[in-house]
Image (cartoon, grey):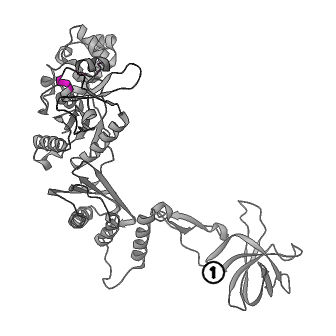
Amino acid sequence: MRRIVSVWLPYLSTERLGKPAAAGPDDGLAVAESGGQRRLVAVDRAAERAGLRPGMSVADALAIRPSLRLAPAAPVEEDALLLRLAEWCVAYTPHAAPDNWREAIAGAGLWLDISGCAHLWGGEAALLIDLATRLGRLGFTARGAVADCAGAAWAWARFGAGGVLAAGGQRAALAPLPVTALRLRPDLAAALTRLGLRRVGDLYPLARAPLTARFGPAVGERLDQALGRADEPLSPLRPPALLSVQRRFVAPIGRVEDVEAAVEQLLPQLLARLEKQQLGLRQLALDIFRVDAACRRISIGTSRPSRDAAALLRLLFLKLDGIDCGFGIDSLLLSAEATAPLAARQTDLAATEQGDSLAQLIDGLGNRLGFPRLQGFAPAGSHLPERAVRRVAVDRPPPSPEPWPALRRPPILLTRPEAVAVTAPLPDAPPLLFRWRQTLHRVRRAEGPERLAGEWWRESAPDRDYYLVEDQDGDRFWLYRLGLPGQFNPAQWFLHGLFA
């Protein structure tokens, strides 16, 4: 059964600014919009007790409270703070998101889908208490509600008593609440109130067709969402991980060594769950939740599926070095962000596989430099040297790699063949000497020719006769003559590659 938490932060705009030491206890703080006719956007508790409300002009507010402190509105900074709080709430559930809807009532909020998560915190009521307590320690006033749907939770947190609404109890609980609790625009709520439809329960017996014809579809849609008759999907900040394990600390930890010790205990638990499903890790993420609501994510990747705990810890600890623990860390979440099938295999304990060593090298370089910066090579299915190799991503190997051809090819292939002057006794004989880059090379040994014809389906190109030659210094070169003997006068020779 789906259960949604709505958290209301009524004084977020003012509480994020804190309170200056020189300010009096009853001066009050308000956030005002900029422009010609300045109005209050949000007020704190002291200003609220003095009778100030959002929407009041700044002139009227100062007439009531001359000592009122004013701050400019900063919606971008508020949204950024709300986003950080939502990321911090991932410690409670992977389905967390900010709630920026502020049309009906001041203050922003948070969404949490705790379906299947409440028992980890001792129940829904205990989860709400813990969440409100932690937000209170950070300096934010918070009130939350749990219900079957987002609309009911939103209404009960802001206009009801807050807390847990029993499953299926939203219809009776929302009936005495004002129509503003349905997240209607102020003009719609005012129009309904003028007609005597002041409470949510007043809308229950009304026929939907006349209501839609008079006020549009918004009233009916919001009512259905609040009663759970219409689905309202919530978009989490990040896609939920396939598998995850979490560790919460009784007292915050503040050393990197303590984080490493906790990760060493969490990773075997995660790998054991992956082994049951015959999966291997491709991407591992560690979320670090600090007591000041800061959330730091560390992610590592592997070039192929892996359940090697030692190798994964080594990669993860490289990124943990120098991490800022702030005022302490109260929770860690280790998640399998990407997985791939990995069946069990039996190997010789005394043998070291070359593929494992190469994979560890690629993983180390990829996590330091970034996997997009690493490239490998694979055969491309062409007999022409310049088209016989293609670049591939090292962390995304081809599904069915082609075998490398059993041909002798130079490890260094020039991007463009360079013309050389060659002396050969006969048109089809190997060269005796050649000049390349102003240096004369006398040939001691030669092999060839190896004739490569052009690809007729691509372009019309003359055939090439390749020779492997070795000069008197022992250096080896890969030369080719363009065209068949007698086609060119004089013959055209090129250097295409070098052997180490």
Give residue 268's quadrant in the image.
bottom left
Question: For the point 26% across and 58% down, which residue is it?
Answer: 325
Q: Residue at x 33, y 58 (%)?
A: 298
Amino acid type, label 1 = Arg
**Quadrant of res 199:** top left
Relative horizontal placement of residue 123, taking residue 290 as reference (left or right): left
Q: Residues within 10 Å of mark 1 (few under 14, many from 20)?
A: few
Q: Is residue 307 visible?
A: no
Q: Work out which quarter of the rendered image holds the C terminus and state it.
A: bottom right
Q: Position of residue 378 (x, y in %)?
A: 54, 68
Left or right of 74 in this view: 382: right
Residue 385 in which image quadrant: bottom right
- Disc 1: which residue: 408
SS category of the residue bearing label 1: loop
Instruction: Name the foreground residue: 305 vs 68.
Output: 68
Q: Dividing the image into 4 quarters, which one contains the N terminus?
A: top left
Task: State the residue at coordinates (15%, 45%).
Answer: 118
Q: Which residues are magenta?
A: 47-56
Vertical order, 19 against 210 (above or below): below
